[in-house]
Image (cartoon, grey):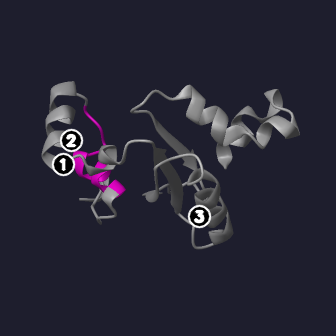
């Protein structure tokens, strides 16, 4: 998992083996773990290995993709894990209300982009 690369300089090899448990310990009850998992169709083994590791520590594990034009392959796969499965079931209406209330103007993000966590296909703001 990419997270191990982000904090690798401060962890020994033995500590890296406990990285998923360290992440679980750092999250609150409704915490969400997200990690970069490279390009799924080019590096499927990494996604499979991430799922096997994360599912030992989290009740809800899944993956989603995002278009990253500057990354080779174009589509980045991300791991999503939490102890609370209902976090991945938030309705589009709730997401839209939260986004509107935040009053943030984005060129890429739309509330429907977040619905990708339920594996739906949506257009980003700049591709509409």
Placement of 47 over or under 21, stated as above or below: below
The structure residue drawn at horizontal position 59% and vertical position 64%, both measured from the top left corner, is 39
**Which residue is the site of mark 2?**
95
Q: Tell me the quarter of the image containing the C terminus.
A: bottom left
The structure residue drawn at horizontal position 46% and vertical position 49%, both measured from the top left corner, is 59
Q: CA distance from mark 3 to mark 2?
A: 27 Å
**Which residue is the site of mark 1?**
91
Q: Which mark identifies residue 39? A: 3
- Quarter location, residue 45: bottom right
- Quarter location, residue 31: top left
* Image location (x, y in percent) of residue 74: 52, 63
71 or 91: nearer the viewer: 91
Label 3 SS: loop
Q: CA distance from mark 1 to mark 2?
A: 6 Å
* Image location (x, y in percent) of residue 21: 65, 38
Which residues are the magenta region?
A: 105-117
Label 2 SS: helix
Nearer the N terminus, badge 1 or badge 3?
3
| Label 1 vs label 2, nearer the camera | 1
* Image location (x, y in percent) of residue 65: 45, 59
Residue furthest to the bottom in view is 41
Asked if the residue under mark 2 is in contact with the one under mark 3, i.e. CB atoms within 8 Å, the reply is no
| Label 1 vs label 3, nearer the camera | 1
Placement of 64 over or under 1, stated as above or below: below
* Image location (x, y in percent) of residue 92: 18, 49
Q: CA distance from mark 1 to mark 3?
A: 27 Å
- Decide if residue 105 is in sight here: yes
113 drawn magenta: yes
């Amino acid at each position: 998992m990419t997270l191990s690369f982000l904090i690798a300089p401060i962890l020994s090899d033995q500590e890296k083996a406990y990285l998923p448990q360290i992440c679980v310990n750092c999250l609150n009850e409704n915490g969400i773990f997200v990690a970069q998992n490279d390009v799924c169709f080019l590096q499927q083994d990494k996604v499979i290995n991430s799922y096997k590791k994360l599912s030992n520590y989290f009740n809800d594990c899944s993956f989603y993709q995002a278009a990253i034009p500057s990354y080779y392959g174009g589509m980045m796969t991300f791991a999503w894990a939490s102890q609370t499965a209902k976090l991945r079931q938030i309705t589009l209406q709730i997401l839209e209300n939260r986004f509107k209330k935040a009053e943030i103007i984005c060129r890429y993000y739309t509330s429907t982009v977040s619905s990708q966590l339920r594996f739906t296909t949506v257009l980003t703001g700049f591709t509409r």
